[in-house]
Image: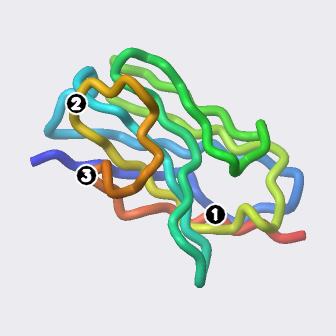
Amino acid sequence: QAQLQESGGGSVQAGDSLRLSCVASGHTFGAYTMGWFRQAPGKNREFVAAIRSSGIIGYGDVGEGRFIISEDNAKNTRYLQLNALKSEDTAVYFCASARGNYFYTPKDSREYEVWGQGTQVTVSS
């Protein structure tokens, strides 16, 4: 059974950085798009970034260029580097996987089948 496990969240000050990790088990990264989403209290889940099975990266409107997604296939791990954090970045960050060879970056959460439990990021100003 495919599973995803996030880690790396925490409480930081505005301007700090964090690196989130997502380790996959039970499925093959090569055949999936791996995405990151976030959800703040009272708000809808937002697309942050994704790496397609081809290696092509896509970003959402959140982050404004401050977030960087990367991967280490040998470790079955995807990362999300969060830089210059702001209080409005406070949210639960989720990783998710979408099966198939996409020719576009899937940004709708409904396209992702497997989800991690999320990791909390809290930014104090």
Task: Tell me the kind of residue under disc 1.
Answer: Val
Q: Secondary structure at mark 3?
A: strand
- Observer-nearest residue: 124 or 101? 101
| Mark in the foreground, 2 or 1 | 2
The type of residue carrying mark 3 is: Val
- Residue 114's disc number: 3
Q: Specify the farthest residue to the front.
A: 103
Q: In 3D space, how far apart are the residues under numbered discs 1 and 3 (Cα atoms)?
A: 21 Å
In the image, is residue 92 above or below residue 29? Answer: below
- The mark that comes first in sequence, 2 or 1, is 2
Q: Are marks 2 and 3 in contact (CB under 8 Å)?
A: no
In which quadrant of the rendered view does residue 40 lie?
bottom right
Task: Say which label, 1 or 3, has the lower sequence index.
Answer: 3
Expressed as whole percent of the image width and height from the top left, the position of residue 28 reads 19, 28
Label 2 element class: loop
Whole-angstrom CA distance, mark 2 to mark 1, is 30 Å
Q: CA distance from mark 2 to mark 3?
A: 13 Å
- Which label number is shown at residue 121? 1
Residue indicated by mark 2: 100
Classify residue 16 as left or right of residue 116: right
